[in-house]
Amino acid sequence: KLGISRQAVSKWERAEASPDTDNLILLARLYHVSLDELLRTDEEIPIGEENNTECPEAESMPEEKTVSEETDVLREEKSFDKEGVSEEKNISEERGTANEEAGSEENEEYVNVSLKGVHIKDKDGSEVHVGWDGIHVEDKKKGDDVHIDKKGVYVNGEKYEKGYFFYHWNFAGFICILYLVIGLFFHAWHPGWILFLLVPLWYSFVSSVRKRNANIFAYPILVTLLYMCAGFFFNAWHPGWVLYLSIPIYYSFVSSHRRKGD
């Protein structure tokens, strides 16, 4: 009923230990007696010089403690243990909080979509910002960065031809604005995200036209876009996957055509 072990009760019975104040109160309530009746004893405790003269061995024996003194000691030990545990707990909590704050600044990640644009940050520190002022991408793993704005296009600190990338910036910005419009006003965040597949398609298409090389065109992304549309809008996941079989046919045809041209 007190929630203590049998070994603790056995030590009480053998006078090897005494109950603390809390257990004394619980014992008094359990047996419906007062603390005075619980602690009362018929044995007389010899105190003073008479005890020392009558018992010669008293000098060599350790001084016995009364029940009240033992309970006071146990109470002090208990309070000391509680204070030590609480202090240690506070120290560990402070260290944990400090580590969390230090780690949160380095590993903070978020996704923010609003009228100002799309802002994404990964745990490794990589960031993507698409807004009215341009497109800014930083890849911390590879150490690459791309910045597209009114000043031009900068890739890893090097400026690229403005006229060449101007179309990409306009198209990418148009896709972002279109995605925000259909998401905010028509709640079509899904499957509206497939619009972003048009950005690499446009980029690869312009590059293939400029360099006159059809191999540069991202034909697998075009197939993926068509497959997604067939699945989302017509529920034709099967047999829509057959579209992927056209990928090797496309590249083999383009390669053979280039060899004939050479």
Image: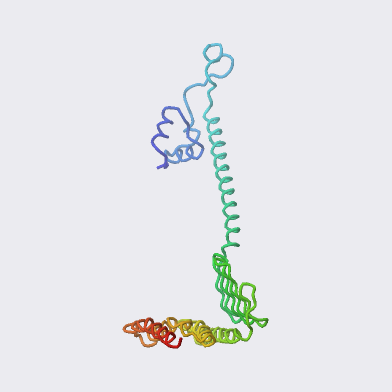
Q: Please say if 217 is above or below 16.
A: below
Q: Position of residue 127 (x, y in %)?
A: 58, 71
Towards the viewer: 102 or 217: 217
Most distant residue in the front direction:
262
Q: In the displayed structure, does residue 112 sit left or right of residue 16?
A: right
Towards the viewer: 262 or 165: 262
Towards the viewer: 131 or 79: 131
Q: Please say if 150 is above or below 73.
A: below
Towards the viewer: 72 or 147: 147
Most distant residue in the left direction:
239
User: Can residue 187 be seen at all in this image of the molecule?
Assistant: no
Q: Please say if 63 is above or below 173.
A: above
Q: In the displayed structure, does residue 245 sit left or right of residue 178?
A: left
Marker count (numbered)? 0
Q: Position of residue 115 (x, y in %)?
A: 60, 82
Residue appearing at x 66%, y 83% in the figure: 150
- Quadrant location, the N terminus: top left
Quarter of the image for residue 160 reads: bottom right
Q: How is the image coloured?
A: rainbow
Quarter of the image for residue 80 reads: top right
Q: Position of residue 187 (x, y in %)?
A: 49, 84
Q: Position of residue 105 (x, y in %)?
A: 60, 62
Most distant residue in the right direction:
151
Q: Please say if 262 is above or below 120.
A: below
User: Can residue 66 be seen at all in this image of the molecule?
Assistant: yes
